[in-house]
Amino acid sequence: MDVRIPLDESMFGFGWVLAGWTVQPDVMVVLGEGRQVGWVEHGLDGGDGWVAVHDGFFLGDPATQQAVLHVTPELAARTIRQARIHDLTASQDA
């Protein structure tokens, strides 16, 4: 990976980064707390937006089953962070 974009620490916490390759700018890995927690991809669903993928699933609207399209990869990464927090909270409640 030759591209690293640190994500806003005040919003994401410490150590969150978008990483990718200049030869494939439409795909970026989301690294959180030292490991891959998902990825974001532009145009993945054929639309003109960034889709967040977490645990192998598009993150989107449960009612319509449509992926949410984000304007920027940072916003898509934020959705992954929220899903991760939800997953961690749910596993602690079990």
Image (tube, rainbow, N blue to C red):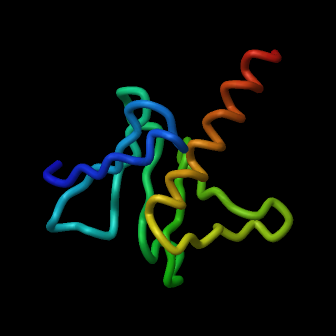
Q: Is residue 12 left or right of residue 23?
A: right
Percent across and percent down for residue 32 are 43, 34
x then y, percent, for residue 46: 50, 82
* Residue at image location 35% in from the left, 50% down from the top: 18
State the residue at coordinates (33%, 46%).
6
Q: Position of residue 81 (x, y in %)?
A: 57, 42
Residue sticking out furthest to the front: 10
Query: Image quadrant of residue 92?
Result: top right
- Provide residue 38's location: percent of width, then percent of height: 47, 45
Please, which residue is most extreme toward the right here? Answer: 63
Q: Is residue 42 above or below residue 92?
A: below
Is residue 54 rendered to the left or right of residue 61?
A: left
Residue drawn where x is 66% and y is 25% of the image: 88
Q: Residue at x 56, y 47 (%)?
A: 80
Does residue 72 sit above or below 86 in this rendering?
below
Which of the image's four quarters has the C terminus?
top right
User: 40 and 44: which one is in front?
Assistant: 40
Q: Nearer the viewer, residue 40 or 64?
A: 40
**Label total for image:** 0
Q: Quadrant of residue 58?
A: bottom right
**84 w.r.t. 19: above or below:** above
Left or right: where does residue 26 sit relative to residue 41? Answer: left
